Amino acid sequence: MQVPVTILNANTKREQGRKAQMGNIAAAKAVADIIRTTLGPRSMLKMLLDPNGSIVLTNDGHAILREIDVTHPAAKSMIQLSRTQDEEVGDGTTSVIILAGELLQAAEPLLERNLHPTVIVRGYTRALEDALSVARGMSFPIDTADRGAMLNVVQSCIGTKYTSRFGTLMAELALDAVQIVAQDLGGGSTEVDVKNYAKVEKIPGGTIEECKVLRGVMFNKDVVVPGRMRRRIPNPRILLLDCPLEYKKAESQTNVEITREEDWAALLKAEEEWIATTCATIAAHKPDLVVTEKGLSDLAAHFLTKAGISAIRRLRKTDNNRIARAAGATIVHRPEEIKESDIGTGAGLFEVVKIGDEFFSFIVDCESPKACSIVLRGASKDVLNEVERNLHDAMGVARNITLSPHLVPGGGAVEMAVSRALAERSTLVTSVEAWPYRAAGAAMEVIPRTLAQNCGANVIRTLTKLRAKHAEEAAAAEGVAGCSYGINGETGEITDMRALGVWEPLAVKEQTIKTAVESATMLLRIDDIVSGMSRKGAPGGGGGGGGAVDDAEPDPEALLPE
């Protein structure tokens, strides 16, 4: 008789085959159920308490999942999805998790019928291609120069958020910021770098209505010598440096032995002369404002004040880059290399203003700023954090439309049209892939179903009427995809989304469907989970087991919510 060979550590936990797949599906369903109620305009809020005792109140899918600590590997993979969606398009973070969870749930009965995961994956991939072609068939272009239409789209995308009660304020802020930051690179390509060049500054106090987009930059700094340097300069000439304006210290530790008092005086005089020469070099170009990322000594501040130049020191690199874009300046690395073309003259006003207990510097009224600051005011930090999250989503939508100006109907209309199209086309799929192909189509209905659930409508009756409406429209249009009927998230009634004016960018919809299907297919491919690896630095981390592994290794199944 052959003796069994043990390869893995005795304490290692291993799940194989069906058990691993069912565990992953259960984990994905649990994550999707957490944020299912946060979809749509009638969504619920989640209150999250972090270990420090601070509270997060939000209905943003990504913000909720970012705060939740999970241990199951499949659940972690699902949470990564919302992060990917947030970074790529900035919106649709809740939809992508719900859709991925539903696709995995739809695969469960197929696995129980002993359908091979690879067959299911092939069916899902085929359904993904057809779903994207249906979504593109329903899209239509939008004129990005039409501000009213653009505002309407951004507003309908953030209508589910907390800030929707303040009218079109957030949509206007997002649109203004994106239009300022957008840069035409030529050849029909546009760059919209919201992350680096549209900075959000949150200042507690005031009211939400005081939020605004500055045609320029603001930062939390005051001039170096407040009493003697000018705090208000119209049409300033701005010089940006990333080198220190103080005497250079030696690279390595240096000892200087001085025997005479005159030598000590000469040493001090050399330092003073170097600083005086550097400041004279700067003053020769007649800047009104010098901004440096490094230090600026008291002596340098004295010489600059005598020359009538205001100075700001130790500014963040990112803020310096924004000033350079806004004022048309170039960041200089050495004072000797300054040229007239490096001086920024595009700003209309430099001003230091006291807000609350702190001083803020404003470089505003720029001629053609390609960077901006968005000032958010609100009653408390919690309100400001939620407004910032909503604004991030709104800017994501505005950026997507600017880069890819195509829209599709919202309110679950696209998902319902995709579901109907896949059910129709599944009759043409002759192999066993027809089962998962049809299951993917049925899973798409989860978005309109969740919208109906969250606004308290009769789900079965509403969905049946919506299916019938789509079938009727498709028959009338002779099979052309394009029924724009969806669910009104406010009332739960079936409405034509074109008439209601609820639109979504095609880029968001495509990214949602792609990400959800690809993550579902990835999780279905997993058939082995090995957990309980030896901890780093544990004694005897190699073989036999003793104290190498914590015996109380948590069971991933047991960590799921009931």
Image (cartoon, rainbow, N blue to C red):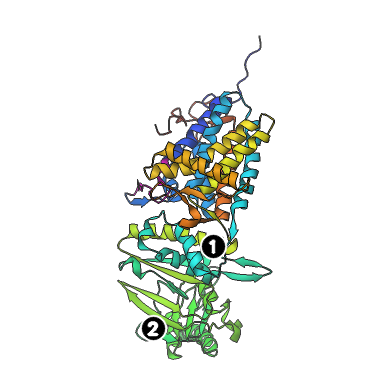
For the C terminus, give its image quadrant.
Answer: top left
Front residue of 15 and 508: 508
Residue matched to label 1? 399
Residue 351 in which image quadrant: bottom left
Residue 390 image offset from top left, x and y in percent: 42, 58
Front residue of 275 and 469: 469
For the N terminus, give its image quadrant.
Answer: top right
Residue 488 position (above or below residue 542): below
- Kindly identify the residue that appears in the image at 65 percent across and 34 percent down: 427
Which range is magenta?
34-52
Query: The residue under label 1 is which amino acid type?
Result: Arg
Residue 413 image offset from top left, x and y in percent: 52, 48
| Label drawn at residue 231 | 2
Dot 2 alpha-carbon crowd within 10 angstroms: few under 14, some 14 to 19, many 20 or more: some
Residue 258 image offset from top left, x and y in percent: 49, 79
Mark with earlier residue (1, 2): 2
- Kindly identify the residue that appears in the image at 64 percent across and 70 percent down: 185
Q: Is residue 423 visible?
A: yes
Q: Nearer the viewer, mark 1 or mark 2?
A: 1
Residue 542 in which image quadrant: top right
Q: Is residue 259 visible?
A: no
Query: The residue under label 2 is which amino acid type?
Result: Arg
Front residue of 303 and 224: 224
